[in-house]
Image (tube, rainbow, N blue to C red):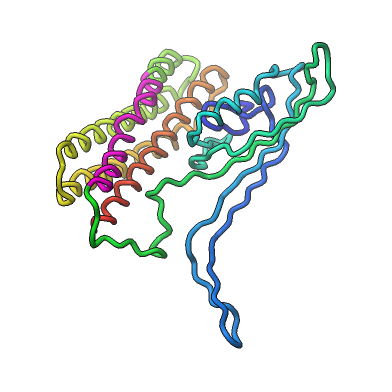
Amino acid sequence: MSDIMMRLGSFGFGITTAAYQELQRRTAYKWASNERFGKDDALQATGYGADTISLPGVIYPEFFSGTEQVNELRDMAMQLEPQTLIDGRGNMLGQWVIEEVEERGTIFGPQGVALKQEFTLSLRRYQDDGEDFGNAIEVVTSAIPVPSTLSSATQAASSAAKGTTSLVSSLTSAVSTITGMAGAIGAQASSINAAVRNGLNAAKRLQNGGSDALRMLSGVKSITSIPSAMNSLVNVGGEVSRAAGAASGVLKLANIADQTAASAVRNAMIDINRVNVLAVSVRTSAQSVLTKIG
């Protein structure tokens, strides 16, 4: 059984790395209030507030993980990029950013090395511009500047075309690795191999869909030329999300005794979940562009 409690980007929280002792999540929702004479205040939903997670934990470098775990988290935070958060059961929790890394060392050994490191990691959920709050805020589309709309459309297409590069590479390797582990996987080998291949094909489909949309947007000078590329991305994003979700579902149910094979399958599932997250993001962004165009 894997000792991973949760994974943020490439960093896995666990007993042999950095184990958190608590998980505190706080989600806020925005309501504007207007005072009324003789009545309760009138409330109007205006959107979502911050969604944050605090992870306080302890590391014992002498026994397990060495002294660089907190520094790895700092290095990730310094990238200033959102990271995919996945729990130990493979469930996707969305995109999150690291807002703060706090460290406290106690019980010092030779050369001033802390034998006990306490840390607190502060995360905040990341939402791109395509994630609007329902119809609470009306979008005015009467006079949309072509450059900004084209930029948003190009960004959505580029995310699909380029954001899948590392995932296609990783899943291609996973197919080869898992195929070679058929004996260790056992009776489930055929279905697991098919699921990983389906995940790889989904990643390639999203990549190709993004490339096609970029070609369609090349040389665009009018708003009326953008919808066809965005509609294509919406359809591709939906197809890929469904395919990746189905493939991930198969892998999630896998019960493999061999630890090396189990780890390879879990890593493939995590990559396929990332494909799903990216597909949903691309689809949402494309839908947002279409909404602005009206």
Quadrant of image for the N terminus: top right
215 displayed left or right of 53:
left
Quarter where residue 106 is shown: top right
* Nearer to me, 275 or 253: 275
Segment tinted magenta in the rendering: 147-172
In the rendered image, residue 245, in percent from the top left (x then y), is placed at 40, 39
Quarter where residue 171 is shown: top left
From the viewer's perspective, is residue 47 above or below residue 95?
below
Q: In the rendered picture of this protein, how many numbered marks are placed on residues?
A: 0
Which residue is at 59% across, 85% downward?
A: 39
From the viewer's perspective, is residue 233 above or below residue 141?
above
Quadrant of image for the C terminus: bottom left
In the rendered image, residue 219, in percent from the top left (x then y), is placed at 14, 38
* Nearer to me, 33 or 249: 33
Whether residue 122 appears in magenta in the rendering, the answer is: no
Which residue is at 32% across, 32% downward?
A: 202
* Nearer to me, 113 or 135: 113
244 displayed left or right of 48:
left
Whether residue 167 appears in magenta in the rendering, the answer is: yes
In the rendered image, residue 81, in percent from the top left (x then y), is placed at 48, 34
In the rendered image, residue 33, in percent from the top left (x then y), is placed at 55, 72
Which residue is at 40% across, 55% downward?
A: 132
Taken as a whole, is the magenta stretch helix, strand or loop?
A: helix
Q: Return the residue found at the far bottom.
A: 38
Which residue is at 41% across, 65% downward?
A: 136
